[in-house]
Amino acid sequence: MKDEGTILRADYPYTDDEAACYANSLERQFYLTQEYAYDLAGGDLNEFKQFLRLGAIGIAFAVSSSWFQYGSGVYTDSDGCAGSINHGMVAMGYGTDAETGLDYVLIRNSWGADWGDMGYGRVAISQLD
């Protein structure tokens, strides 16, 4: 992204057609001024929230079979730990669910608006995660 830049989501919406790639023809809008990565695995939950207050974060996630059926609410993995990391998403924010009291991270998935809550989901988080 530092050299190539990135485009606006509105200019390049998600489709499930893997063959359709026309990103190279679109005008770049943003460029990174710095390159950095920070490994939050096993890190402090408050530190993770600090980063989210600065903006969206690309995250890696271990998806289990129950993830495919997620539709709404705060997701808790009924299958237990899915094992190895096998999916990437974007963490957009965090909050506490008024009904359950569960803390969650708001994510945007890459599977389009038909998945979850219009392409978004809430995943339960805790200091132990």
Image (tube, rainbow, N blue to C red):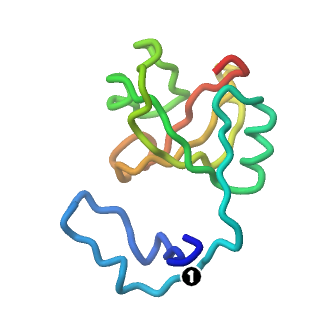
In the image, residue 55 lies at what x, y percent? 70, 56
Q: Nearer the viewer, residue 52 or 104?
A: 52
Q: On the rendered structure, is 11 left or right of 99? A: left
Q: Amino acid at mark 1?
A: Gln
Q: Nearer the viewer, residue 87 or 125?
A: 87
In the image, residue 37 lies at what x, y percent? 65, 51
Q: Which residue is rendered at x = 67% and y = 26% of the image? A: 42
Residue that mark 1 sits on: 29
Q: Quadrant of residue 99?
A: top right
Q: On the rendered structure, is 109 left or right of 91? A: left
Q: Which residue is rendered at x = 76% and y = 40% of the image? A: 49
Q: Say if 116 sits above or below 81 in the image.
A: below
Q: Say if 16 sits above or below 103 in the image.
A: below
In the image, residue 91 lies at what x, y percent? 59, 46
Q: Nearer the viewer, residue 16 or 60?
A: 60
Q: Which residue is rendered at x = 63% and y = 21% of the image? A: 129
Q: On the rendered structure, is 16 left or right of 36? A: left
